Image: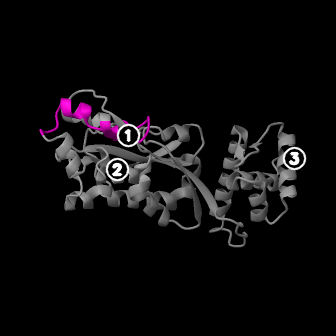
């Protein structure tokens, strides 16, 4: 039988990153926290915390922390039918995988539309965020995968539209004669990280060829916009982020009629589906206020 006083100490250490901060959160001494975590490790026969700056969970420790949060979520759902149940000392934490561009354009509004939760967001590319669900590391994910992950429900959200954008000075310098294969091969391009395929997909859509332009690596949605404004390179920016810049001419679309659309889906574990109904409602409302309807036949690559 699991001892939840010990589990709460473990979760607090992992959540705060230190035994001292965990002790303050639970109103006990650091020595008490250390003893509880050590006792739990001895009972289970496995290391649960990697001591360091910050402290992090091992795979077994992470699984137990997820269990603690799920139990807290279940207890939270009982309060509507059992008014006498005492509220917990902290709001329930939801761990969700989301892509950076959704976080920069609409997902914060979804978070703000809920009450009683804390959010622990895992950032990953929309083509890879479903893996977090498959491993059981998150309760829900914003993903480009429309096929439900095993044990999950899937809701279509809409398509996030991207425009290939650059500053007027950049276009004058690199694309004075128009966008063609030779110019695209020379012009510096912005890319988020090794998982980012949007620029390559757009070049293939616009020019019909696979290309490897020179790259700037910028793992930030806002840095993408700032770099384009500064004339550092061209890149695929979400329309909601650059609409005003396009309207005023600070940014220009390389080919205005060549947009890239990425369909997005909300997938959540069926185990907690009734418990996340308010979160799902808020996610759907926030997404549909910003995202475009998905065109029939559009695949997850945006083609």
**In the visual, does 175 lie left or right of 81?**
left
* Alpha carbon separation for disc pair 3 and 1: 49 Å
Extreme-top residue of the structure = 210
- Pick whichever, 253 or 135, lies toward us: 253
Q: Residue sitting at 69 percent across and 56 percent down?
A: 16
- Residue 4: % across, % down: 79, 54
Residue 72 in the image: state x and y as whole percent: 68, 58
Task: Find disc 3 in the rendering and name its residue.
Answer: 39
**Residue labelled with disc 1:** 216
Q: Nearer the viewer, residue 71 or 175?
A: 175
Quarter of the image with the C terminus is: top left
Give the residue at x 33% y 33%: 214
Q: Is residue 36 above or below residue 113?
A: above
Q: Look at the numbered disc 3 and give the secondary structure of its residue.
A: helix
In magenta, the rendered stretch is 177-199
Which of the two discs, 1 and 2, labels the residue nearer the N terminus?
A: 1
Nearer the viewer's eye, disc 3 or disc 2? 2
CB contact under 8 Å: marks 1 and 2: yes
3 or 2: tag closer to the N-terminus: 3
Say which label, 3 or 1, has the lower sequence index. 3
- Residue at disc 2, secondary structure: helix
- Tag 3–tag 1 contact (CB < 8 Å): no
Evaluate whether residue 245 shows in this view.
yes
Q: x, y (%) of residue 146?
A: 40, 40
């Amino acid at each position: 039988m699991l001892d939840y006083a010990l589990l709460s100490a473990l979760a607090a250490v992992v959540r705060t990153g230190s035994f001292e901060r965990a002790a303050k959160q639970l109103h006990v001494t650091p020595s008490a926290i250390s003893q509880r975590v050590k006792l739990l490790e001895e009972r289970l026969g496995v290391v649960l915390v990697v001591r360091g700056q910050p402290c992090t969970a091992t795979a077994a420790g992470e699984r137990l922390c997820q269990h603690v949060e799920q139990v807290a979520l279940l207890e939270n759902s009982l309060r509507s039918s059992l008014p006498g149940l005492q509220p917990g000392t902290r709001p329930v934490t939801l761990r969700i995988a989301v892509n950076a561009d959704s976080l920069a354009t609409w997902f914060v509004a979804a978070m703000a539309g809920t009450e009683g939760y804390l959010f622990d967001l895992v950032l990953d590319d929309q083509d890879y965020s479903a893996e977090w669900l498959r491993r059981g590391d998150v309760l829900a994910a914003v993903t480009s995968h429309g096929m439900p992950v095993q044990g999950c429900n899937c809701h279509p959200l809409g398509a996030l539209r991207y425009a290939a954008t650059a500053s007027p000075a950049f276009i004058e310098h690199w694309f004075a004669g128009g966008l063609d294969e030779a110019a695209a091969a020379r012009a510096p391009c912005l890319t988020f990280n090794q998982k980012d395929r949007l620029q390559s997909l757009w070049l293939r859509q616009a020019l019909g060829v696979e290309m490897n332009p020179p790259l700037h690596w910028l793992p930030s949605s806002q840095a993408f916009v700032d770099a384009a404004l500064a004339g550092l390179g061209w890149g695929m920016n979400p329309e909601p982020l650059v609409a005003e810049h396009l309207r005023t001419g600070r940014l220009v679309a390389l080919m205005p009629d060549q947009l890239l659309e990425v369909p997005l889906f909300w997938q959540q574990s069926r185990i907690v589906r009734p418990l996340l109904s308010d979160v799902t409602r808020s996610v759907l409302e926030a997404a549909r206020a910003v995202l475009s309807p998905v065109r029939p036949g559009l695949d997850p690559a945006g083609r």
